[in-house]
Amino acid sequence: MLFPIDYSDKKPIGNTSESVSAIGLGTWNIRDYRRAEKAFLYAIEHGIDNIDTAEMYGGGRAEEFVGRIARLVGRERIFITTKMLPHHLRSRDDVLKAAKASLKRLGLETVDLFLIHWPNTSIPIEEQVRNFEAVYLEGLARYIGVSNFNVIELDRAIHATRKAEIVVDQVRYSVLYRDVERDLLPYAIKNNVTIQAYTPIEYGRVAHNPIIRSIAEKYSKTPIQVALNFLVSRPRVIPIPKSEQIEHIKEILGALGWRLSPEDIEYIEEGIK
């Protein structure tokens, strides 16, 4: 087995004292915001307290949607993450302008976590991270992190900050796409960085994998639940699937409260390369 099993349904945010539900909800490509609202409210009522969005999602509509959810359930009940496009990272002023625009759409004075959506390849990592750190220094975000940073970029980012810590790296990670396990996840575990896993069910493709299907049958679970459970079994990993249907939310919630056995995790690790 590549990693010890994490049996908790709460996950730490970086090296802070904060923890959130072991599964979060994403907001990329929502088609029906009215339907999604009902699904998200159901998820929050049943223990999910962790919502991810970004300025680019829906041209800003996703941030507006998350802000509406926060007002409906109470701001203190959800941990909100949003992400900034890399072209804003050229200067501290550009960063603050973009951050304030996101907060205006969210209807918030501060966000829990602000991420760099992906690295700006025209600016040294150190420079863009120091510019981005302004959102923390100015009180616009409680924590900062990155997204789509490889292990070298993450290490540089961690060592670039003045006062803030990089608490999260959000990357693609699923039972079918496990590149991060080679170096990024071990580094993150060692350095107390939380990995948020986007595309954790690969647009439903995990449901067609014969190994996942056989394990699901053994546990009387669905393949989606097995795929998500595999990820939450990893230390410091929080999958963030997207759903706008209550039935799918119920399925996602069914991935919590239990764990695959070490033997079945090893079976998946060996069978899906």
Image (cartoon, rainbow, N blue to C red):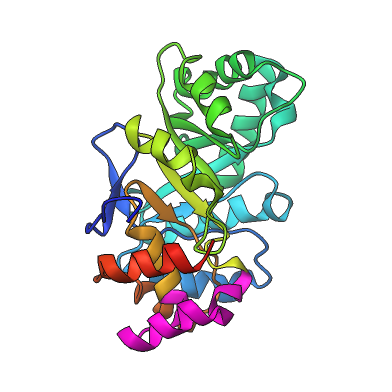
Camera-nearest residue between 263 and 38: 263
Q: Is residue 28 visible?
A: yes
* Residue 84 rendering spot, x and y as whole percentages: 63, 36
Residue depicted at x 58% and y 81%: 208
In the rendered structure, the answer to whether residue 233 lies left or right of residue 231 reads left
User: Does the stretch in magenta take in 178?
Assistant: no
Residue depicted at x 46% and y 34%: 110
Residue depicted at x 26% and y 65%: 262
Specify the segment rendered in magenta. Answer: 203-225
* Residue 240 rendering spot, x and y as whole percentages: 48, 58
* Residue 87 rendering spot, x and y as whole percentages: 75, 28
Image quarter in which the C terminus is found: bottom right
Residue depicted at x 52% and y 28%: 154
Indicate whether 22 appears above or below 265.
Answer: above
Image quarter in which the N terminus is found: bottom left
* Residue 32 rendering spot, x and y as whole percentages: 65, 73
Q: Is residue 44 visible?
A: no
In the rendered structure, the answer to whether residue 45 lies left or right of residue 176 reads left
In the rendered structure, the answer to whether residue 187 lies left or right of residue 179 reads left
Camera-nearest residue between 82 and 220: 220
Question: In which quadrant of the rendered view does residue 191 lie?
Answer: top left
Indicate whether 92 appears above or below 44.
Answer: above
Q: Residue furthest front?
A: 270
